[in-house]
Amino acid sequence: MNLHEYQGKELLNSFGVRIQRGIVADNHKKAVEAAKQLATETGTGWWVVKAQIHAGGRGKGGGVKLAKSLAEIETISESMIGMMLKTPQTSAEGKKVHQVLVAEDVYYPGENEPDEYYMSVLLNRATGKNMIMYSTEGGMDIEAVAEKTPHLIFTEEIDPLIGLQPFQARKVAFNLGLSGGALKEMIKFVTSLYTAFVKSDASLFEINPVLKTSDDKILAVDSKVTLDDNALFRHKDLAALRDLREENDIEVEANAAGLNYVDLDGNVGCMVNGAGLAMSTMDLIKQSGGEPANFLDVGGTADAKRVETAFRIILQDDNVKAILVNIFGGIVRCDRVAQGIIDAFINMGDAIKVPIIVRLQGTNAIEAKQLIDASGLDVISATEFQEAADKVKEVLAS
């Protein structure tokens, strides 16, 4: 589950991480009031207006702008709220901006120049350890830094059983070239950041940039936070932060029905039980000349209602020209799945207007094929993987 920038910052701040202060607003009048409040509380005279969507690269799409007066706050926020913001991480259509974050200006003048760093905390799956990734090249795409100047990216691995050690936090600060008060601030920042990562059961904390201000304060100017969905039952308060407006409507509906669904851009819908079989089925579709329109795992209880729900979800995609049902009967018997498919067809009536290829293999597969063939429904049955691939190819060509 992804959090908005303002939500991520609030979470970080609750663990002692210093942040760029800001107030979220969903219309231009509230944005002006937020700017006035920040001016009173922080003394800031300039503000940064940031579109709140679940995507990076907002600045490149016009989603981050500096305002030097209350009049500019009103103008910028009014034009930004409601816009379809396109960034390198959104679709071609973009994402609608429902709210903006009005944040204090932290690039104020002083004796020293402000510096920007990159920092993230994530799991290194290769080693099974948590990892802090950091660089002196903050404010840039980390992918570009890795490609052009990989020697400027540092990593520090932490054994999750032991936790972050003080010498590791100091090492991060030293590698960033800090000293004096800024070094002490960074040690505190890193320690608090790692604590926030572990305590919130996150899968990613990314802050780009981490800023060293002109008076040597270290703070998070941005935040990208992804929480582990499997741990949300332990964090009811964090689960309540989910913004369904930022998610695919069909995926939200599928999730509510207990289906594992990912929307894709292809023309062949997939209904499969088991993630591994689903991946193989997607490969099968590719080899037959089609493109997967979705990843859908109905799980081990493919009864009539579940199958019907899966069909309805897949058919919401107008690009779907055929559906491949590929079920392995292990825990669930194939003949029960076949009956579920037949019942779903009867219940849905004329809603199914695309060819359906059904491959059932495993327990009672022969009985299942007989049920499908004897149903009189417009369903194409297959037994072998290659046979199913050939059937997909035929219906796409017709």
Image (tube, rainbow, N blue to C red):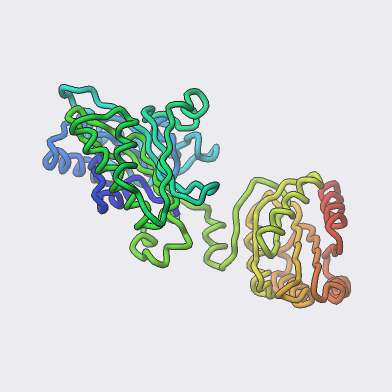
Q: Classify residue 209 as left or right of residue 343.
A: left
Q: Is residue 346 visible?
A: no
Seen at 68% across and 49% down, the residue is 319
**Nearer the observer, 152 or 244:** 152
Q: Is residue 134 above or below residue 12?
A: above
In this view of the protein, can residue 339 be seen by the observer?
yes
Q: Quadrant of residue 202?
A: bottom left
Task: Count how many numbered circles sit on residues in the image.
Answer: 0
In the image, 94 versus 177, the foreground residue is: 177
Query: Is residue 103 toward the left or the right of residue 128 in the image?
Result: left
Instruction: Examine the rendered structure and indicate whether residue 134 appears above or below residue 150.
Output: below
Of residue 213 and residue 186, the one placed in the foreground of this image is 186
Q: Position of residue 274 (x, y in %)?
A: 67, 63
- Image coordinates of residue 84 in percent, x first then y, are 45, 39
Q: Nearer the viewer, residue 126 or 237?
A: 126
Task: Pinpoint residue 351: horizontal percent, then vertical percent.
Answer: 70, 64
The residue under the point 69% across, 53% down is 279
Residue 182: image x %, image y %?
22, 33
* Left or right of residue 390: residue 315: left
Give the quadrant of residue 335. bottom right
Question: Is 90 placed above or below 107 here?
Answer: below
